[in-house]
Amino acid sequence: MNEPRSLPIQVFDPRQEYAVVERKLPHWFQAGTLAFLTWRTRDSIPASVLSAWLEERDQWLRKHGVCSPLAPREEPSRGARGLQWRDELQKLAPELAAEFQQHFSNRWNDDLDRCHGECVLRRPELSAIVAESLLKFDGERFELTDFVVMPNHVHVLAAFSDEQAMLRQCDSWKHFTAVEIHRTLGRRGKFWQQDGFDHLVRSIEQFAHLRRYVAENPRKARLRAGEYRHYSKEL
């Protein structure tokens, strides 16, 4: 799926106005700036894997004098304690903060790529539901550049007009696709993990890196043709 189109690429500029919206996870937003979004299915990270991830993270935080969250959570950080340790993390030397982000973000994505859980999105008719939903309002509600639908998670690169537009659209994508997937499977209940992850793209170089990451994700997870859906718009 490739559709030529000329788009202005805007990356994060700390000199311009931006917002941090606090939900289950903090969401950074800047109007028109590309964001890297990730959602995962509810069974994509087993409890034992999550527990090991949290323990390793908390050991690193304690080692560097950062107070870590006191109790395991369903996501990498949640609530007031999660925001507190994130604030303290930003006070560390830049190289330490970067080390933390790279190591634990990579570890989280590696665990997703091990394809835990039922991985129903391997099925072409189910991944098509997600792909078609992502493409439907491109150019109207948002500007989409890339996505990949993996067996148990989705990565998206897109820009939105304001923070509420981003949050509403993500909720809409997840609600619609969950209903349609469950209808196809003859099931009911939750499909996606409640909250997702988003990261504002900080530079053109990082944008290029994330586009490569999205494109190469199926190969990294050793998927075969038909077990994923990748889209990249020619810019």
Image: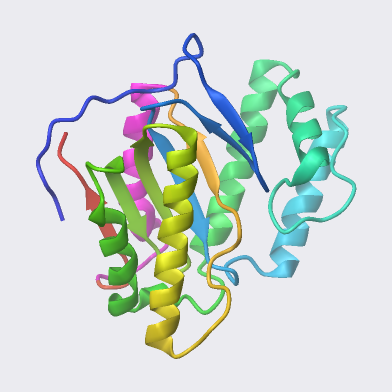
Residue located at (53% from left, 84% from top):
188
Residue occupying image coordinates x 47% and y 12%: 16
Q: Position of residue 122 (x, y in %)?
A: 37, 75
Quadrant in the picture for the N terminus = bottom left
Q: Is residue 223 magenta?
A: yes
The answer to whether any part of residue 151 appears in the image is no
Residue 158, image x, y percentages = 35, 40
- Depicted 130 relative to depicted 233: above or below: below
Residue 79: percent from the left, percent from the top?
77, 44
Q: Nearer the viewer, residue 120 or 101?
A: 120
Q: Which residue is located at x 69 percent, y 24 percent? A: 96
Can residue 106 be seen?
yes
The quarter of the picture where residue 7 lies is top left
Q: Residue at x 53, y 52 (%)?
A: 109
Magenta region: 203-225
Main secondary structure along the magenta-highlighted residues? helix
Q: Residue 226 location in percent, x, y?
A: 26, 73
Q: Quadrant of the C terminus?
A: top left
